[in-house]
Amino acid sequence: MEQNYYQKEIETMSAEEMKKLQSEKLVKQVKHVYENVPYYRNLMDEKGVKTDDISGIEDLHKLPFISNADLRDAYPYGLLAKPLEDCVRIHSTSGTTGRRVVAFYTQNDVDLWEDCCARAITAAGGTKKDVCQVAYGYGLFTGGFGLNGGSHKIGCLTLPMSSGNTERQIQFMTDMQATILCCTPSYAAYIGESLKEQGYKPEDIPLKAGIFGAEPWTEEMRQGIEKTLGIKAYDIYGLTETTGPGVAFECSEQTGMHVNEDHFYAEIIDPDTGEVLPEGSKGELVFTSLDKEAFPLLRYRTRDICVLSRKKCSCGRTLVKMAKPMGRTDDMLIIRGVNVFPSQIETVLLKEGYEPNYQIVVDRVNNNDTFEVNVEMTTEKFTDKLSDIIGMEKSLANSMKIMLGINPTVHLVPPKAIARSEGKAVRVIDKRNLI
Ligand code: ADP
Ligand code: ZN
C-alpha cells in the first residue's frame, strides 16, 4: 500500500530529533504543571524534585507518578492547569461514583487530539475523498468526537452517526457509500452480522477500512470483521486521561500501534517497583502528556500491561510502537466498551441490602459481550416465590444499569450457593479469552 502521512515530518522523524523535541517539550511542560497544579507540585516537593532537575527526557524517571487514585483525590478541578475560562470542553469515562474521570481540554488540546486521530485515519488509507462513518458514541465518551474531529481535519465527508440504531447505520453506509467505519470492534462485528443477515456480501459493501478500538479485541476477531465487511481493520488506542482514542494507532503493517510520541511519551515500568524497564519488556504502560495545556498528566499510570518496540516499521513511521494491551494491573473489565469495576457492583448490592456475595460472568457470543451477575439472596430476603424473585432481579439489574451505564442480567441464587474461596474471592469469570 502506498503510504500517506498526515504529518510526515513528525511521523517519520529520526530518533535523535524526536528525543530533542520531546526533551524541549518536557522541560516546558514540567514548569507549566509545577506552577499551575498545586496537587502535582506537592508530589514533586515530597519527592524532592525541582523543575531545574528536569533538563530532558532522560530525567523523566525522576518525576513522581500520577495514578487513578490521584485523579479521584483531585476530582474535579485539582489537576486542572489552566483557568476554566480557557477550557472549551470536558470528556469523561463511563465510570460513576468515585471512579469517574473528568478531563478538560483547551481549544489547542482539542486540535492536537484531532491531529492524532487524523494521523490514524490517514494511516488506514483515508484521504479527503473518503466518506467516514463515525459510529462511536458522541457525548461525554471520547470516541465519537475524537474521530469526528480527525475526519474533518483530513477533509473526509463525515457521517456523525454515533453508536446504535444499526438499521440507520446500514442505510447511511450503503446510501452515502461510506468507505471508512470508526466504532468499537464489537459494534463493527455486530454491524457486519446485521449486513450479512440482510443478504449483503462483502463486495456489496462500499467500506475499505475500519478504525476500531476503546476495548480489547483479538486477532481472530479482526480476521472475522475483515472478512464479513471486506475491509482492512485497524486498531486504535487511547484513554480519557490522556485525551481519548488516537494516543496510538495502527499502520498497514498491523503489528502494533504507533504511539504519537511527540505528544505522549510512553514508558514501561515494573508495576510493583515503579522502575523503568528497557524496550521490549512487558510491564505497565505510563504516559506523559508533553503538549496538553488543560489536563497535562505527567507519568500517568494506565494500568494497561504492554510492550514497546522500536523495530523498524515497513510503513516508514519511526514512532515507537506499542503492542495490543495484554491485560490490566487492576480489576477493571471492559464490557461492551464500558469500564466496569467489580467494586461498583458491590456498592449497589450493599445499598440494596444484599451481602457482597456475587460473581460476574462475562462471555462473548456472536461478537457481543454477555454480562451476567449472580447474586446470593440473604436469609432475610430469601423467597422461593418466582414472581418475587423476578421482581428482585429486575430491580437489582436496574440499579446496576444506573451505576454502570450498561444492563446486566441478574440471577438471584440461594444463600451460600456461590462457592467461597479460601484466598481471594473469584468475583469475575471472563470467558472471552481476549488476551
Ligand atoms: P476510551 O474513552 O478511549 O475508551 P477509557 O478511558 O474509557 O477510554 O478507557 C481506556 C482503556 O480502554 C485503556 O486504558 C485500555 O485498557 C482500553 N483500551 C482502549 N483502547 C484499546 C484497544 N485498542 N485495545 C485494547 N484496550 C483498549
Ligand atoms: Zn508502521
Image (cartoon, grey):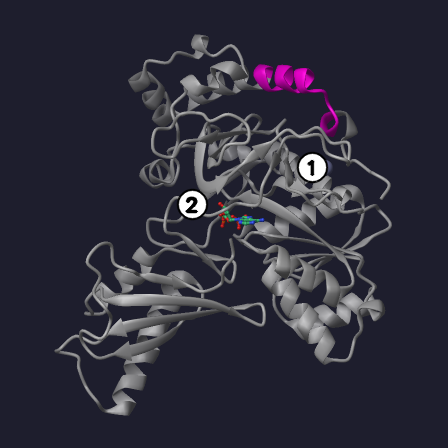
Instruction: Pick whichever, 269 or 69, lies toward us.
Output: 269
Q: Residue at x 49, y 60 (%)?
A: 433
Task: Name the residue tied to disc 2.
Answer: 101
Q: Residue at x 50, y 32 (%)?
A: 281
Residue 288: x, y in percent? 51, 28
Q: Give the left or right position of residue 219, taking residue 58 as reference.
A: right
Q: Which secondary structure, mark 1?
A: helix
Query: Against 189, is 198 above or below?
Result: below
* Disc ID at residue 345: none
Quarter of the figure with residue 106? top right
Q: Amino acid at mark 2?
A: Val
Please provide percent x and percent y for residue 47. 32, 18
Which circle marks residue 115 in the picture?
Answer: 1
Image height of 160 relative to 262, above or below: below
Tell whether circle 2 marks a residue whose Cβ is less than 8 angstroms from ligand 1: yes
Q: Is residue 16 magenta?
A: yes
The outermost residue toward the top is 52
- Callout 1 environment at 10 Å: few (<14), some (14 to 19), or many (20+)? many
Report whether 415 appears left or right of 192: left
The secondary element bearing badge 2 is classed as loop
Span shown in magenta: 10-24
Q: Main secondary structure of the magenta part?
A: helix
In the rendered image, the quadrant that contains the N terminus is top right
Q: Quadrant of residue 341?
A: bottom left
Residue 24, how many percent across, how many down?
Answer: 59, 14
Earlier-in-chain disc, 1 versus 2: 2
Q: Could you tell whether 158 is left or right of 97 in the image?
A: right
